Amino acid sequence: MAYWLIKSEPFKYSWEQFEKDGSTFWDGVRNYAARNNLRAMKKGDLAFWYHSNEGLEIVGIAKVIKEAYPDPTIDDETWSAVDFAPFKKLKKPVGLAQIKTDKRLSNMALVRLGRLSVQPVTEEEWKIVMELSGTK
């Protein structure tokens, strides 16, 4: 299993709305590195759900339920989408400031590549964020 981080602006699509919907497709990615990360995802992989621009915190975990396919919002096979379902809400959100001050996370893509909307997360980083959130 691989781990990821996906960003959503809560005023556009929040974790709470995602939980109500029960699933969603991740579309609109127009960055090649982020697209390649989407294409690398496998069914069953887990992704931190990060509220960007507002909140700046990891709030939940989504599970990949359908691997990459052509983004249905654009007539161009260059871009991909992936389907997710809610897996678990974190006991307590883990904020960007907290991540940046934890030396163990200094190489995390969220710290180094702040603008990338779909990022890989190492197993060690995953465990640390889970520890910080108080979630098992």
Image: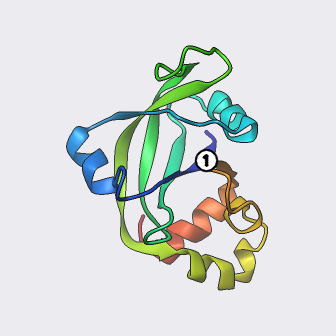
Query: Is residue 114 shown left or right of residue 57?
Result: right
Residue 41 position (above or below residue 121) = above
| Residue closer to the observer: 78 or 57 | 78
| Residue closer to the observer: 23 or 12 | 12
Residue positioned 60% across, 48% down in the render: 4
User: Badge 1: few (under 14), some or many (20 or more) residues near its Cα, within 10 Å?
Assistant: many
The spot of residue 47 in percent (x, y) is 52, 48
Residue positioned 72% across, 32% down in the render: 36
Q: Determine which quarter of the picture holds residue 75.
A: top right
| Residue closer to the observer: 73 or 99 | 73
> For the view shown, which residue lies furthest in the front direction?
75
Residue placed under numbered mark 1 in the picture: 3
Q: Determine which quarter of the picture holds residue 38.
A: top right
The spot of residue 128 in percent (x, y) is 60, 70
Image quadrant where one finds the C terminus: bottom left
The spot of residue 94 in percent (x, y) is 49, 73
Q: Determine which quarter of the picture holds residue 77.
A: top right
Residue positioned 53% across, 20% down in the render: 74
Query: Is residue 38 shown left or right of residue 12?
Result: right
Q: Amino acid at mark 1?
A: Tyr
Residue 23 position (above or below residue 79) = below
Query: Is residue 17 shown left or right of residue 8?
Result: left
Local secondary structure at mark 1:
strand
> For the view shown, which residue lies furthest in the left direction?
20
Residue positioned 77% across, 65% down in the render: 112
| Residue closer to the observer: 103 or 68 | 68
Image quadrant where one finds the N terminus: top right
Number of numbered labels in the structure image: 1
Residue 105 position (above or below residue 118) = below
The spot of residue 134 in percent (x, y) is 42, 74
